[in-house]
Amino acid sequence: MYYDAVTNQHGLPFDPFKAIVAPRPIGWISSLDSTGRINLAPYSYFNAFSNRPNIVGFSTQGRKDSIANIEETREFVCNLATMNLMKEMNSTSASLPHGHDEMAHAGLTAAPGVSVSVPRVAESPAALECVYLQTVDLFDKDGKPANAWLVLGQVTGVYIDDAIIEDGIVNITKARPVSRLGYQDYAVIDEVFQLVRPGS
Ligand SMILES: Cc1cc2nc3c(=O)[nH]c(=O)nc-3n(C[C@H](O)[C@H](O)[C@H](O)COP(=O)(O)O)c2cc1C
């Protein structure tokens, strides 16, 4: 099949776009508002964009609490969403009133940040502390606002639970991160394989 993505005439019961851009890592974003109240929410329009400096970003569909907090306090943390935290991760996606602490709501513990004042999720085996860099306003090809914003941050500190480090290497199958697919589907990393680039 082929369809026109501008008019989105796919003829299928559900939009297949996100099922193709899959798997998408989940940035489980913690932030603080200007009064120090914790916010936590999952974003699967999330990825890394640069090595040195380490730059990561997520996109928000509509202006939600995370972007508002981050633009205000200029810091955030991306926590690794793992299989054993699925229920908690999902519960932090509920639309709670601004200022309501989703970390506490999900029964999670806040561990203090080191390079930022935003706490990480103590139960998560890895976290990227970030300083806000910029927001990219997204527009369509005709210049119409997409009602979506890409928030970029530089990683200033990395937490890794020593339990997932084996022989100096992060054994990601010990962390079992979950990623988002299309529809209501998720995938878990339980198995990895190696492939060496030509010439290396
Ligand atoms: C796995 C998962 C991934 C999500 N990814 C996104 C995303 O990429 N962009 C977005 O705007 N909302 C996404 N959401 C919905 C937000 O988590 C939800 O709107 C949340 O309430 C936003 O919280 P905030 O207002 O505290 O930032 C996702 C939800 C789930 C469960």
Image (spheres, grey):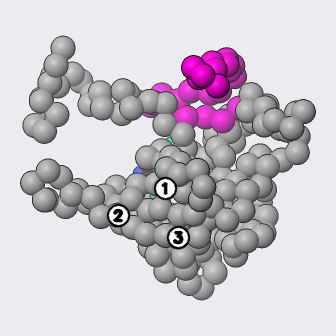
Residue on which disc 2 sits? 136
Residue on which disc 1 sits? 57
Residue 76: where, in percent of width, then height?
59, 66
Chief secondary structure of the magenta portion: loop
Which quarter of the rendered picture does the C terminus lie within?
top right
**Residue 37, image quadrant:** bottom right
Q: Is 50 placed above or below 182 here?
A: below
- Which disc, if any, is residue 132? 3
Note whether residue 77 is visible.
Answer: no
The three-letter amino acid code for the residue at tag 2 is Val
Label 1 with label 2: CB-CB less than 8 Å: no
Residue 171: where, in percent of width, then height?
78, 32
The three-letter amino acid code for the residue at tag 3 is Tyr
Which SS class for mark 1?
strand
Decide which of 77, 101 is in the foreground and name it.
77
Which numbered disc flags the more N-terminal residue, 1 or 3? Answer: 1
